[in-house]
Image: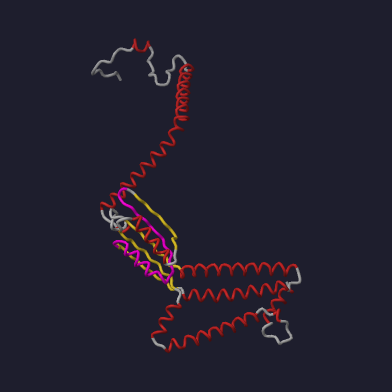
Amino acid sequence: MATLVTLLALAGCGSGSDGGVDSAAGPEQGVAAEDAGSRAGAGERGGADAPAQQGGSGATDTRVEQRAIIYTGTMRVEVDDVEAAAREAISSATRAGGFVGGDQRRSTAADAVATLELRVPAAAFAPVVEEIAGLGRQQRREIGTQDVTEETIDLDARIASQRARVDSARRLLARASSISDLVSLENELARRESDLASLEAKKRRLADLTALSTITVTLVGPDATTSDEEDEAGFLVGLSAGWRVFLTSVTVLLTVLGAVLPWLLAFGVPLGLLWWVTRRRRQRLRADAAPAGRPTPGQQPTPPVEAAVSAPPPVPGARSAP
């Protein structure tokens, strides 16, 4: 570990040492060179933006075009022919350079519904939306935007810094002189490369969302309801929903009963007969084992014959002697 600390110290002090230190010992030299290149690029961008800033209103347009914006849209359009309208919407997206991200369709005797998820370039977002709205009678449209310019710039800076850290770890790994240093540096390099891959994946996902906008289109037939189910309210809507839940519960109950009934017939009936026969047999054994003068279970005791004959019947109103 002392060698590892020495290598890290040399790497940290390499950029501040004199010309006698080897350039491979200082990973910060690459970072400093990259920072210098970044400053040079920033100066070039600043020089390119200066005329635009002097141009007044042109500067605003340039800044808007350079921003990273995610466009999303949701539409509901009533059409006469759902299948034909779905084909037209897909054709509009493909002509603009996009593709179909999802396609769900339902056709019944009462109504027909098609839900399409279209991915189109950001520059063609508005024209495609207007083309789809012209396919029929538009019932709903929701357009949303999300500005991710600052997040994109932050990701670029973090990726550049992480790449420099990966290069530094690789140079230190090449100079490792012991097994312990080699293992430690390999683990550190793997961790840094994993972080770099995660940042690059986020950048690709963000670039995909900004380059291709998402339009979710719902095409409904003329017999479909004009409003979404989640926007409906009232007694009849609640009654209808409750009736559907009741029917669903009854269906589930009957399904469970149908699944359990064969098992009841196969095992429940024999077990019930066995229990009844066993119970009858126990009662018979108890009756046989009881003494002659002892009443059996369920039988009323009978008084002795002598007592019943000698005892005179009671006289009504008679009082017993003291």
Q: Residue furthest bottom?
A: 54
Q: How far across and how far down the image is residue 25, in percent?
A: 71, 79
Q: Residue at x 43, y 80 (%)?
A: 63
Q: Is residue 132 magenta?
A: yes
State the image quarter where residue 145 is shown. bottom left
Give residue 40's quadrant in the image: bottom right
Image location (x, y in percent) of residue 264 = 44, 32
Judging depth in this view, the residue of 80 and 149 nearest the camera is 80
Residue 99: in magenta span: no
Residue 221's place in the image compared with 55, above or below, is above
Identify the image quadrant of the C terminus: top left
State whether residue 294 is above or below residue 238: above
Count of all numbered marks drawn on residues in the image: 0
> Above or below — where is 297 with respect to 129?
above
Res 181 → quadrant = bottom right
Front-lying residue, 136 or 165: 136
Q: Residue furthest left?
A: 317
**Residue 205 left/right relative to 81:** right
Question: Which residue appears at 52% of the width and 75% of the height?
Answer: 154
Residue 229 appears left or right of 150: left
Color encoding of the figure: secondary structure
Q: Residue 152: x percent and y percent?
A: 50, 74
Q: Which residues are magenta?
A: 109-137
Residue nearest the viewer, comparing 68 with 318: 68
- In the image, farthest residue toward the right: 177
